[in-house]
Image (tube, grey):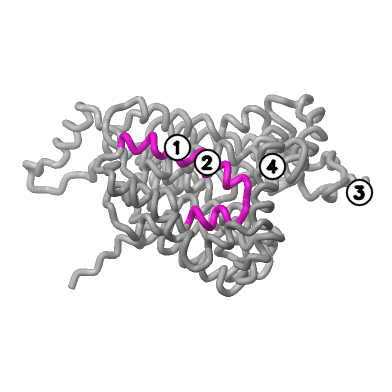
Amino acid sequence: MKINLRFLVLGVFVAILVTDRGFNQLFFAHEDDPLLGRYHYLLVGFSLAISLLNLRYMSVGMRRWFFAVLTALSLLALESYQGWGSWMVYPHVFGKLTVLLHVFGAYSYYRRVGQPPFGPLVFLILLGLGINLAFFNSDSLSLNAFLNNERGFVTTSAYLFLVVGLLNLNWFLQRGHLLHVCLFFGCMAMIVFLQHRTVWVSTAVALPLNLLLLRRVSGVRFSAQRLLILGLLPVLVGGVGGVAAIIDNPNVIKRLEASIEDIQNPDKQGTGSWRMKQYEAYEPVLRERPVLGWRLDGFELPVQFYSDDTDAPVWENFTGHHFHSFYLDRLFYFGIVGVLLVLLMPIYVVAKRLLQPGPIPATTAALMACCATLVVYAISYDWPAYYYALVGLMLAGVQDSAPVPAAAAVAVAARKRPAARPFPSPEPAPPALTY
């Protein structure tokens, strides 16, 4: 019997994925556990090593981006040594750049070995989150928890339901299996139940984007039968087991209406108003150094954001400025250059692929739709480590699905011909990449 060990290639992505609280809570009681912090440092070195070992599998553009990040880190280290006599005086600031290495680690590895099996990945995500709910956050699954806005997962963990949901939606429209549509609606129900409004907005953006991308996915059929299942299944489930009674509960409706109002009025109520006040507090500081930001000096800058109740700094000085926005975080520490360093190359790679002909795999389309929402997600939250790995995985799929130029195809075919001479030929170089 032949055992398929292909699922083992998931290890690189899963190693970074477990940094999310939905998974590491299974092993660490507290987020600030020192051992967990060491694991983050270990992952950075791991991603850097993988990137260097697989450097030749990177496209030209990705390789330039990789060296741009390494250059930025080197310059920051020189600045640290010149001003403070230490090569890495404030790891909190360096972490804003080192986390980018997860993009290149995941990207280069999956460019080398190909896309991982997403079926086992979906299983692992649902298994991990399911165990977390069952043993650590079982109280959050009650109606009372919903009405009191007691969420079982943090936003980053809830976002995984969007990733799993889109993958299953695309598989259903491609294969027609009922299990996939059930998992899709189950993930959508969890997104609504967990009440993370940022994930709601991300879902509202991702679904239409995914439908547009499905026009490029081969094998997808919007048949009457499949559309009927998509329309009737939630209605049938909603009418069974008292679900309809829960949905019609006036308190549930008020809770949902309050969350929707928070989305519609982000500058006046909810956590959106809190973020707006934080931005207004830091706006004068941002204007002082708009291009390259404050960098290491920013860590020593006193906290600019004060509590309305106690008129005291929200955080202690010399602990970092804990922004609830990716854009605000990068603008403060590294300015406009810092934002472009993260977003410019992925947008370019995806845009270039969309302008090229040829089909896009269903899994890659789902990842593209998810990663596109990270631009919106970044308004409310900073990106955790696994988001960068997700972007790397997506970019690998995007470039793997790109049409190969004729000259490169001939070169690859020539390398595959058997050598005329009896002695072994050298290891073949990777296919020519044009990005």
Residue at x 80%, y 37% (from the top left corner): 277
The residue tagged 3 is 309
Mark 4 or mark 1: whose residue is earlier in sequence = 1
The residue singled out by tag 1 in the image is: 208
Q: Residues within 10 Å of mark 2 (few under 14, many from 20)?
A: few
Q: Is residue 342 left or right of residue 221?
A: right
Q: Which residue lies under the disc numbered 2? A: 204
**Mark 3–mark 2 distance (CA, rounded to whole Å):** 35 Å
- C-alpha separation, residue under disc 3 versus residue under disc 4: 24 Å
Mark 3, secondary structure of its residue: loop
Is 148 or 317 nearer to us in this picture? Answer: 148
Taking the image as shown, residue 29 lies to the left or right of residue 363, namely right
In the picture, measured across the screen, residue 327 lies left or right of residue 108, that is: right
Question: Would you say residue 89 sits in the magenta stretch?
Answer: no
**Residue at the right extreme, as displayed:** 310
**Which residue is located at x 45 percent, y 28 percent?**
348
The amino acid on which the numbered mark 2 sits, given as a three-letter code, is Ala
The reply to whether the C-beta atoms of the residues labelled 1 and 3 are less than 8 Å apart is no
The type of residue carrying mark 1 is Pro
Q: Mark 1 and mark 3: span between their CA atoms?
A: 42 Å
Which quarter of the rendered picture does the N terminus lie within? bottom left
> Which residue carries the number 4 mark?
261
The C terminus sits in image quarter: top left
- In percent of width and height, residue 101 lies at 52, 45
Labelled pair 3, 4 in contact (Cβ < 8 Å): no
Of the two numbered discs 4 and 1 in the rendering, the one whose residue sits closer to the viewer: 4
Label 4: element kind: helix
Q: Nearer the viewer, residue 178 or 16?
A: 178
Q: CA distance from mark 4 to mark 1?
A: 22 Å
Q: Is disc 1 placed on a helix, strand or loop?
A: helix
Asked if the residues shown at circle 4 and circle 1 are in contact, with their CB atoms under 8 angstroms apart, the answer is no
